[in-house]
Image (cartoon, rainbow, N blue to C red):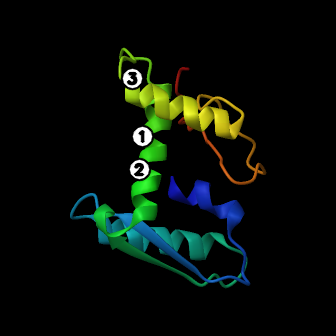
Amino acid sequence: MFYYTLRDFLHPESEYRIYLDYMDTLGSQKAKKLCDVLKSGANFELPVSTTIIQSYESQIIQLCDLLIGAISYKNRDDIDHTSAIKQQIIAYLEQKLCHQLNYSTSQWEEKFNIFRFSPRGAQC
């Protein structure tokens, strides 16, 4: 899944260090696999490395957690959206982005992309 999110943004003239939030004991295997897939999927030598860190060690990862949480909350149909603070965060983000958080963006849109994943054979 990470591969599809990253592949169109990687260029051979840049070096990439990808920081992943610690999730479970299999994280190092998943990080290594991500590096392998990115390197083998590129048609060029791709300097990429991954590092797993705790989210409290990085404000950027905390910000990513906040953004992903807001997008996830907005897109969930199985819950009542009763949290006032979450609604305020979503409204603020939508106002700044000038679009809703519940639709896919084009992959060439700069700055902020939302990719909706639909597995093959899934009924939507």
Q: At which x and y percent is residue 11? A: 72, 75
Badge 3 amino acid: Ala
Q: At which x and y percent is residue 23? A: 28, 58
Give me the disc on residue 5.
none
Secondary structure state at the residue bearing disc 2: helix
Task: From this view, report whether residue 78 is shown above or below residue 33.
Answer: above
User: Is 23 or 67 nearer to us in this picture?
Assistant: 67
Labelled pair 3, 2 in contact (Cβ < 8 Å):
no
Give me the disc on residue 69.
1
At label 3, counting other C-alpha atoms closer than 10 Å, the crowd grade (few under 14, some 14-19, many 20 or more) is few
Q: What is the CA distance from the residue labelled 3 to the residue labelled 1?
A: 14 Å
Task: From this view, report whether residue 54 is shown above or below residue 63.
Answer: below
Labelled pair 1, 2 in contact (Cβ < 8 Å):
yes
Q: Which mark sits nearer the N-terminus, 3 or 1?
A: 1
At horizontal 58% and vertical 76% (from top left) the residue drawn is: 39
Q: In which quarter of the image is the C terminus?
A: top right
Q: Which residue in the protein does label 3 denote? A: 84
Task: From this view, report whether residue 79 is shown above or below residue 24.
Answer: above
Badge 2 amino acid: Asp
Badge 1 amino acid: Gly
Of circles 3 and 1, the one toward us is 3
| Quarter of the view holding residue 81 | top left
In this rendering, position of residue 94 left or right of residue 122: right
Q: At which x and y percent is residue 95? A: 65, 33
User: Is 55 or 114 nearer to us in this picture?
Assistant: 55
Give me the disc on residue 65.
2
Secondary structure state at the residue bearing disc 3: helix
At horizontal 67% and vertical 85% (from top left) the residue drawn is: 45
